[in-house]
Amino acid sequence: MSITNLTHLLAPRTIAVIGASDQPGSLGATVMHNLVDGRFGGPVMPVAAGRRAVAGILAYPNIASLPVAPDLAVICTAGSDAPALIEQLGQRGCRAAIMMEAPGDRTTFMAASKSCGLRVLGPDSLGLMVPSARLNASLGHVPVLPGQIAFVSQSGAMFSTILDWANTRGIGFSHFISLGGGEDVDFGDILDYLANDEAARAILLYVEDIPNRRDFVPAARAAARNKPLLLIKANRAGNNRPIGAFLSETLAAPDEVFDAVARRAGALRVDHMDELFAAVETLARNRHMKGERLGIVCNGADLALMAADEMALIGAGEPARLINLETAAQPDRYGTALTELVETSNLDATLVIHAPTALSNGGACARAVAAAHQRVGGALLTCWLGGESSMTARSLFAEAGLPNYETIGDAIRGFRHLVDFHRNQEMLLETPPSDILELHSARRSARAIIDRALDRADGFLTDPETRELLSFYGVATVESVLAATPEDAAQAATRMGFPVALTYSSPDVPRKWDVGGVALNLENAEAVRTAAEAIFHRVASTSPELRFDGFGVQKMALRPHARQLMIGIACDPLFGPVLVFGEGGRAVEVIRDHALALPPLNRPLARRLIAQTRVSWRLEAQGGRPAADLDAIADALVRVSAMLTDNPEIIACDINPLFADDRGVLAVDARIRTAPPDQSDLRSFSILPYPAELEEPATLRDGSAVVLRPVRPEDEQAHADLVNRMNETDLRYRFFGTPQRFGHHQLARLTQIDYDREMAFIASRPVPGQGWETLGVVRTVADPDNRKAELAILVRSDLKGTGLGSTLMTKIIRHHQTRKTHEIGAQILSDNTAMLALARKCGFILTSSEDPEVTECLLVLGD
């Protein structure tokens, strides 16, 4: 991914139109017309052989004859000419192009683009519009209205449709971009650019497919931290579930994986265009809602009931408090009710509903609501029902910047957008408990099992190996023995104690029930012997191709209150490993009650995954059946996630059934398959797990030992303690001011980082009886091109002079040398003499900046 030269594409100063024309309906004529009509402020240079002028503007016969190098070239000629044109543009000094036709040879075309560093939007792009730059380099049939929304479409048809649709509704945009084929400039590049463009207050994407998710996921997560990111993913029907050898593979449909990606990225996915623009309006005006409790003010009890029904139907939070003002409600009562809810109730948002009536002036009531909101604030949604009688109120709310809806259903869907967005944003700021993640011994013990499986052609773990691996990670399993013959099975059952279960063990059988390979509640040795012989002959006669490893003999798990669940691992061809959770048992594929999540997981993320399923309702207490232990289920998900991140060679896993009751969880049956690691998307994590390989010991000048390691989310409290032990001068040096007490969100942002783009190494040491303390931290944030990383460092005030600062600086510099970062920069207050001396010692070049109080420091690592 790269934002190199994207300024030339999205904010050009000069433009050349290759293949400019005056022929009506041609690409060259349309682009020229739009550029001229848009009153672009810089030179527009038509390139048209044999023409003196195009659209009244002096034309040039070829690229070489252009008087200045264009920032942007719009290529309107036949695609077969593309490679030669790109090469000529690069030689002329052009750094960005829009390719509207498909090139004949995409490989040659892209090679020419990369060789000269020229960024290409397209091919098959309809161009782009940036109203603030008076730029309309597109095939749009109408100009875009100015606004604060950036819209990026992969579909040319949707580009034109939404342009027309938005114009009729008065919706404006900061950027309107047709991505086209995305051969060079893709969603990740555009997201990185728009994330830091203040003109775009929200980003909307229309996605058909994502050819390269390595750019998309980190860019989407970075953008969603800065502003609302909303998207539509087309082709739901075309994303049929794959047929896999594992249940998890079959359940992990591409579209459901994309849902999981959007949630984990902090984005909001919607289903259609009306909903997309309604959602962005709602989020733009009520983005910082903190929970899911909705208060309702209305002039009729039936209106509140309708709202509550809609909330239950679509799972949009919970109605927390109702104020019914009755039919004749007057304006002052609306204002008083809204004020009361905001000031005295523990609510996260309020919905005010008004039905037209001869006894209540809707316009006056709207003015009272707007005035009350201006006084007390809070997240507010309004719904003035009716037709013409409600137009005045809706106009008033629009002027006041308040989202308003024509129906109760629309209003509740708006609230659901707030709820979903809040949930997805919280996913970026979770703090896992450290006790779940301390699994170093499991990692070491698991290695031998994984290596043995990799030595086999099919990569399967045997049944005993599968159970042993799960037990290493703290997932309890049913006692099981593998027996070679019916007699061996009978003897094993006798030693184990009755009753027992018997299964046909084969790596080729995804569901033992399907081949008649299961017998339950066997009470004696003869029953085991007879069942084993029957199972063997049954499977051999119906499925002779299946391999036979033996008979699995398990002690019957007698847990009458248990619910049957499943946990699985699958690998999506685009987004890599995913976790699957849901209803278990024999009818998994029929019931299809499951949800997906991206690893790695912590307990809050695991609880969110559980809550997405219908089976979560059955985990509650029912009659004499006690509630299942949700913490134990969540821990099992976290432990399976840890097993996967520690052992990325695992490509598929089914734990089914997983018994869950008030006593915890128990894995009754499981299968795991491995494959050697590779560099494909299929095997790469969309969200990088904790890089444990970067941990190392270090010794300070006083001989004390510390551990240098990447920061982890569970370091939040230790990070807070570090800041609290700093003196005011050192805090001013680090934060260019004395910060107030850090809250959870600020600390979470410092401790839960995207290891793909950021790095924060901490120095840590154990405190007897208190866990670990953080002594210092060095942090860098790299640009998407990995060209430059910005550095900051903080060492506890009482540890200066111990060499800790030098140790941390050496660690981060070595890290960026390994990553092949070009340079590291830092801004240091000019009176911070100790830090300036450390920077010089580490090889930084110091220069003055425009601010006399700040010194610029730069360390060049290489090309």
Image (cartoon, grey):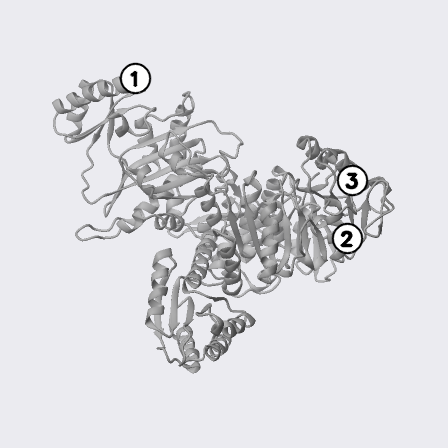
Closer to the chain start, of discs 1 and 2, is 2
Per the rendering, the mark at residue 544 is 1
Tell me, yes or no, whether the two marked residues, 1 and 2, touch with CB atoms within 8 Å.
no
Instruction: Tell me which amino acid carries mark 1.
Output: Pro
**Residues at badges 3 and 2 in contact (C-beta under 8 Å)?**
no
Residue at which label 3 appears: 89
**Residue 13 marker:** 2
Q: Where is 18 relative to 449, above or below?
A: below
Tell me: residue 779, above or below residue 640. Answer: below
Which quadrant holds the N terminus?
top right
**Residue 329, label in figure:** none
693 vs 797: above or below:
above
Q: Position of residue 290 (x, y in %)?
A: 44, 62
Q: Horizontal placement of 102 versus 571: left or right?
A: right
What kind of element bears circle 2?
Answer: loop
In the shown orientation, is residue 273 left or right of residue 854? left
- Tell me if mark 1 has few (under 14), some (14-19) or many (20+) residues whose alpha carbon lies within 10 angstroms of its own: few
Question: Spatial distance from mark 3 to mark 2, Cα to Cα?
Answer: 16 Å
Q: Nearer the viewer, residue 527 or 700?
A: 527
Q: Residues within 10 Å of mark 3 (few under 14, many from 20)?
A: many
Label count reads: 3
Is disc 3 placed on a helix, strand or loop?
helix
Specify the amino acid type for callout 3. Leu
Q: Amino acid at mark 2?
A: Arg
Spot occupied by residue 172 in the image (x, y as percentages of width and height): 62, 60
